[in-house]
Image (tube, rainbow, N blue to C red):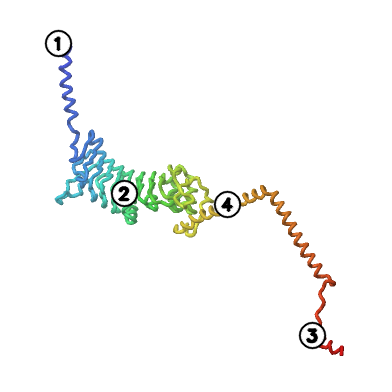
Amino acid sequence: MAPRAGRPALRGPLLPGLLLAAAALSRPAAPCPFQCYCFGSPRLLLRCASGAELRQPPRDVPPDARNLTIVGANLTVLRAAAFAGGAADEDGAPAAGVRLPFLAALRLTHNNIEAVEDGAFDGLPSLAALDLSHNPLRALGGGAFRGLPALRSLQLNHALERGGPALLDALDAALAPLDGLRLLGLAGNALRRLPPAALRLPRLERLDVHLNELAGLGPDELRALERDGGPLGPRLLLAGNPLRCGCAARPLLAWLRNATERVPDARRLRCAAPRALLDRPLLDLDETGLRCAQGDAADGRGEEADAAGPELEASYVFFGLVLALIGLIFLMVLYLNRRGIQRWMRNLREACRDQMEGYHYRYEQDADPRRAPAPAAPAGSRAASPGSGL
């Protein structure tokens, strides 16, 4: 059977073209690192998620990589120039230099990183976004973020809660050189105060401190957020903090009402103390209702007294209402039994009158001289009377 007309003419040029296209698609643009996964070209996205066996950053990352993600590894310590060939291999020999001049985004979440040394990110001049969230950081070098002139976003969410006050002091030193930082994430770190260095960053546009232990913001912190009449300070995310709604919260409440757009989650701010205001929205309160207690403005030790004040006042109000109810019931009983009470009052009055008349009659009888008894004779006169008859 002869083939249809036109079929050989189509098969001839089509098959070689398909083979050439398949060969071009199967040829990698750049080698993928060992234990990493490349999606498309490394120029677009390079993702490494190899598990606990990855103990240091990969050394064969393509130099044209733009995004690097390492999740779930066991990096533990990021040493100096860890992504530029500064880390040593297992034999102690220095690793080959790896420069990543185009790397713009580096995500290192859930990697059990406990320490970041000075200059850990040297050799990444184009890095704009760095995410170290969900790592149990215990040590942070004062120069950990040096050499990152293009850094705009730094995420340290749920990464600082185990380091204590020393780690927060190191964070202040590490943030100082980041003049171009626009976004800073510090959520879930049990912070009791805002890092002073974060408030001094000149270009910071957003500061995320939700889910911390902030009891409020002091006047100094509010003044730092206003930047003394300069450009507007960063937008602040505060939800999820145990705010203490005492008199020390009055400046914060006034600031929130004047600059609500600066705190996008202002409607979600709720009181955690005193107990009388528990879970009340902060913006729904009146400044006059934020009561002071002894030591409240100074060191917060008057929390129990402040908590007991409104509670005691509420107890007095409740006691007064109970007394008013009892009085109302008593008056109602009197009104319903008014006829019986009147009858009882008449009987009582008559009984009293009869008693008084009896007392009056006895008094008149006792005062009559005719009914008075004869006086008794003296003893001497009785003895002489027989002799007188003789």
Q: What residue occupies the far front of the structure in this picture?
A: 390
CA distance for labels 1 and 3: 181 Å
Residue 105: x and y in percent read 28, 41
Q: Residues within 10 Å of mark 3 (few under 14, many from 20)?
A: few
Residue 36 appears in view: yes
Give the residue at mark 3: 379
> What secondary structure is found at the residue carrying circle 2?
loop
> What secondary structure is found at the residue carrying circle 4?
helix
Give the residue at mark 4: 322
Precedes in sequence: disc 2 or disc 1: 1
Residue 150: x and y in percent read 31, 43
Give the residue at mark 1: 3
Query: The disc labelled 4 sits on which kind of residue?
Result: Val
- Front disc: 1 or 3: 3
Query: The disc labelled 3 sits on which kind of residue?
Result: Ala
Name the residue nearer the viewer: 184 or 350: 350
Residues tagged 4 and 2 counted as in contact (Cβ below 8 A)? no
Q: Residue at x 59, y 53 (%)?
A: 323
Query: The disc labelled 2 sits on which kind of residue?
Result: Ala
CA distance for labels 2 and 3: 121 Å
Q: Is residue 36 left or right of residue 193?
A: left
